[in-house]
Amino acid sequence: MKILVTPSSLCKNQNSEAMKKLRAFSDDIVISALGRPMTEDELIDIIGDIDGYIAGTDHITAKVIAKADKLKVISRYGAGVDSVDLDAAKAKGIAVTNTPGANSQAVAELAFGHMLALARKIEDQSQDLKHGKWVSVVGKQLQGKTLGVLGFGNIGRRFAKMSTGLDMKVMAYDPFISHDIIRANGAFPASLDEIYANADVITMHLPLSDLTHHMIDAEAISKMKDGVILINTARGGILDEDAVYDGVVSGKIFGVGLDSYVTEPPKDCRLMELPNVITTPHAGAHTKEAVENMSIMSVENVISVLSGEYCPNILNR
């Protein structure tokens, strides 16, 4: 069976246990050398004779799936599947799997790092000192501040737990999680407007969908506290980048931490021009431990489906 592998961290580590396991299953493996997500056109050119597909954040549209005549499984390397047309895959009998929880701690830790770095202006001070400037910059203390968590799945809960260690008050919004579960994890259930009005820091851990696209727009920002910190390690489209830019320039927003962008790699993203915006290259899952977890799970998912065995991580049964 022919298997396509596109996640850059998996492609770069050909001696990993996951790749050894995959090669033991199939001797016909196509490794992407692009080092970035594949486009719709690029996938259309090669997908026709692929049986299994371990996918990064490639653009797996209905047009791609229409050309996938032999494909039986799309094994997403990660938890999010917003880059996959699930309905088209289901209609064609293609299983779509993910790796839930494999990178939750890694993403939460990066988001937490963004919060600390923004509050204390660590990047600004580091750059000043490297350029010979001995400047004391006044930041913010996080103890006693209010954190708003948008999306209270595995990542949001881990971030909330870390923040309680700083004696932060945690508010959480998630229409798919019961209030009892939110309370059991040390947070207060809240509406979006309640979080906007009260949170000193807002962190996003939501999938990108019609409901969450541009959730943080000019109207939402106008409802927030002056000097709010925004962190997005989820998906770029959740933020209206132009509205957030205006919020930073006006001083309404104290700082922004970004690990996800509307276009990746980002092009013409004005937010990247601002000194109080910290950016990382969608690196939330890039720890040794998370990479190993996602690699093994994504390989096991594709092998299970192609072998006709039960796979617990199929999303579109």
Image: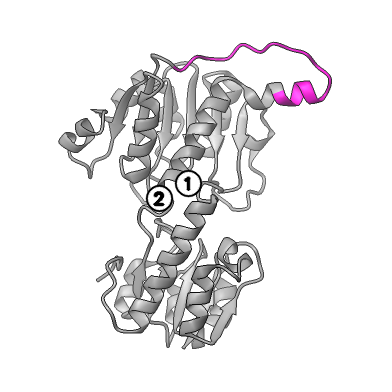
Q: Nearer the viewer, residue 182 or 106?
A: 106
Q: What secondary structure do most residues of the magenta stretch adopt?
A: loop
Image point (36%, 38%), residue name: 158
Write down the region rendered in magenta. 126-142
> Tag 2: residue type?
Leu
Image point (55%, 82%), residue name: 29
Residue 122 seen in the figure? yes
Q: Measured along the vertical axis of the image, is residue 202 above or below residue 44?
A: above
- The reply to whether callout 1 and callout 2 are in contact (CB within 8 Å) is yes
Considering every residue shown, the one lying at the far left of the view is 180
Element marked by disc 1: helix
Q: Which residue is mark 2?
A: 208
Q: Measured along the vertical axis of the image, is residue 25 above or below residue 42?
A: below
Q: Is residue 11 magenta?
A: no
Q: How many marks?
A: 2
Task: Rate crowding at label 1 as few (under 14), some (14 to 19) or many (20 or more) other CA atoms within 10 Å.
Answer: many
> Tag 1: residue type?
Gly
Residue 247 seen in the figure? no
Q: Position of residue 92 (x, y in %)?
A: 33, 80
Q: Which residue is mark 1?
A: 237
On screen, residue 127 versus residue 6, left or right, reads right
Considering every residue shown, the one lying at the far right of the view is 132
On screen, residue 76 versus residue 35, left or right, reads left
On screen, residue 280 versus residue 183, left or right, reads right
Quadrant assignment, res 160: top left
Q: Position of residue 26 (x, y in %)?
A: 49, 85
